[in-house]
Amino acid sequence: MKIATWNVNSLKVRQQHVIDWLETSRADVLCLQELKLPDEKFPHVELAEKGYRSWYAGQKTYNGVGILVRDGLNVDESNIVRNIPGFEDPQQRVIAATIEGVRIICAYFPNGQAPGTEKFAYKLRWLAALHDWIASEMALHPKLALLGDYNIAPEDRDVHDPKAWEGQNLVSPEERAAFVQLIGLGLLDAFRQFEQQDKIYSWWDYRMMAFRRNAGLRIDHILLSKALADVCSSCDIDKVPRKWDQPSDHAPVVAQLG
DNA sequence: ATGGCACTCACAGAGTGA
């Protein structure tokens, strides 16, 4: 099973990119973030025509997450979860589904704006709630994958200019500690299970020709439980869609299970 | 030091993102 995550920065604008990418990647499961559209505008008919069923939690203008599943894969319809149970939040950031016995959790972590702001405090509260919920999900589902836009660059090697970014949002010690807490639940960063080239990132600012300069961050991740990490044969970031016309500022991250 | 780009809503320019 090939699983992937992609922050598309508006599914309305990037609908054709998603369809084109699914056609070439043949991903079985694609987790999407930043749909930026309400559920009634989700293009489920167009995606179904291309062979993918979809489950989603959207809202107008901001946030929104979805899971696309290739026809033929078994989805447990009784076990779809939207948002973090017990964490009241109007922002649509989480959707989970069990696909072929694998618990797939798609998450759009809060940006956080800057340390010390109210949005940063919300990010830390959200991270704590996610941690506790993931712990309970792992107890129920030994085969679990947490995919999404984490808005955290875990280590300095995930940052193009660690000195310039030191202490800033996305790399601050508090955020990195929260990432380590997730790892502490028994999850593994799929990307780091394999030998990788230096300076591989998943996001580049639209400004300052950041992509051409490879001035990026690795903030989109696939974390796997031990049972899945044992069968994971590759994990890569696909930079190709970032080169297309009118691209998302994020690139897809892909893991092959089995 | 600041802004730089893109998207949404809505029709100007603010809010948000990372």
Image (cartoon, rainbow, N blue to C red):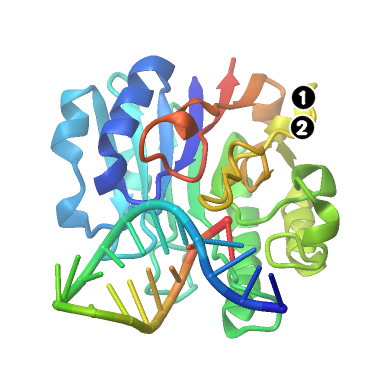
Q: Are circles 2 and 1 on residues that touch, CB within 8 Å?
A: yes
State whether residue A75 appears in this view: no
- Quadrant showing the C terminus of chain A: top right
Chain ID, mark 1: A
* Residue holding disc 2: A192
Q: What amino acid type is highlighted by mark number 2? A: Arg
Give the residue displayed 48% in from the left and 72% down from the top: A86
Apparent side of residue A249 relative to residue A22 in the rendered image (left or right): right
**Residue A33 horizontal/vertical position (percent):** 42, 49
State whether residue A214 appears in this view: yes
* Residue holding disc 1: A196
Apparent side of residue A1 relative to residue A57 in the rendered image (left or right): right
- Mark 2 secondary-structure assignment: helix
Give the residue displayed 79% in from the left and 50% down from the top: A161
Local crowd size for mark 1, using a 10 Å CA cut-off: few (<14), some (14–19), many (≥20): few
**Residue A204 horizontal/vertical position (percent):** 58, 46
Chain ID, mark 2: A
C-alpha separation, residue under disc 2 versus residue under disc 1:
7 Å
Q: What amino acid type is highlighted by mark number 1? A: Gln
